[in-house]
Amino acid sequence: MELFETVNDIKEYLKTKKEEGLTIGFVPTMGALHEGHLSLFREAKEENDLVVASIFINPSQFNNQSDLEKYPRTLETDLKKLEEQGCNVVFHPSVEEMYPEPDTTEFDFGNLDKVLEGEFRPGHFNGVASVVKKLFEIIKPDRAYFGLKDFQQLLIIHKMIKDFDCPVELVPCAIVREKNGLAMSSRNELLSKSERKQASLIYKTLKFIKVQAGFQPIHELKNYVEREFKRKNMKLEYFEIVDMYTLEPLTTWLGSKNVITCIAVQVGNVRLIDNIILFS
Ligand code: AMP
């Protein structure tokens, strides 16, 4: 496995691989790798000649300094895990390497970055799109793998690819969960044992909603979820039932198609997000 820290070095290396006719599958990450990430690498490995990972904690997508500071950093174990997965190339640049000048790129995603995560993390998706666009330009992948766990991010990247005609195929990958249903996340490392147990309410609730979808009125389900989290002393940031492509909230189940429910919950000091597709 090759490790690169500079833009020029990785560009040069991948250029020769491209010239040899090899296809490149790319998995962007912020490190602290878990099974959720590794499932993306397995999929990329199956579909491409060469798998490239990036490990970069992008400051411009953090709207909260303490979230950035406490984000887990586990480079040594990450590299071991990537090697075991048969990853071929890792790009691990410094912030100065990626952004010698402050990041001033501004995207227009319409409504997509204003709601859900966008409402609670202003500027987050602009930072995500900016770094992913830059990484696409450096790596020039044939396919890029993103988890459905960050569903709104997937929509944003999809729009960015379309708007800028990025020559890359976006491959969405299923959510990988812990035994208790909690969606795997690097942030789960920051949960205490009891918080981890508490957090299992998130997926339990999503599964319950999936069973009720189409039968119970939407506003009643929303009230139910708000009450449940209050009862368990957990801070619910949002729980929304929305159109899967526009993220517009649904008010009725009539003609329901392409519906997803998204949730964000603060457990202790850790912010967790999850989602489940109700109707596809
Ligand atoms: P991150 O390191 O959090 O930026 O995540 C890197 C990629 O892994 C993103 O595309 C995430 O959506 C994906 N990912 C994170 N957690 C999971 C999970 N539990 N299941 C599937 N994909 C995930």
Image (cartoon, rainbow, N blue to C red):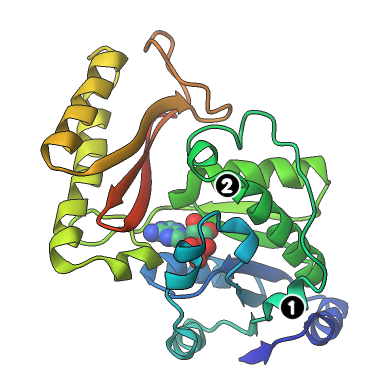
Identify the residue shown where x is 45% and y is 25%: 242
SS of the residue under disc 1 = helix
Mark 1 is on which residue type? Glu
Q: Is mark 2 within 8 Å of ligand 1?
A: yes
Name the one closer to the observer, 224 or 11. 224
Identify the residue shown where x is 51% and y is 30%: 244
In the picture shown, does residue 129 fall above or below 3?
above
Identify the residue shown where x is 48% and y is 71%: 69
Name the one closer to the observer, 105 or 26. 105
Separation (CA) of disc 1 from disc 2: 26 Å
Mark in the foreground, 1 or 2? 1
Q: Is residue 141 visible?
A: no
Q: Are marks 1 and 2 in contact (CB under 8 Å)?
A: no
Name the spot of residue 217 as percent of width and height, x first.
27, 12
Name the spot of residue 268 as percent of width and height, x first.
25, 56
Picture quadrant of residue 145: bottom right
Quadrant occupied by the N terminus: bottom right
In the picture shown, does residue 168 fall above or below 141?
above
Crowding at label 2, few (<14), some or many (≥20) Cα neighbours within 10 Å?
some
Crowding at label 1, few (<14), some or many (≥20) Cα neighbours within 10 Å?
few
In the picture shown, does residue 235 fall above or below 131?
above
Q: Which mark is residue 115?
A: none
Q: Which mark is residue 154?
A: 2
Name the spot of residue 16 as percent of width and height, x first.
86, 84
Mark 2 is on which residue type? Leu
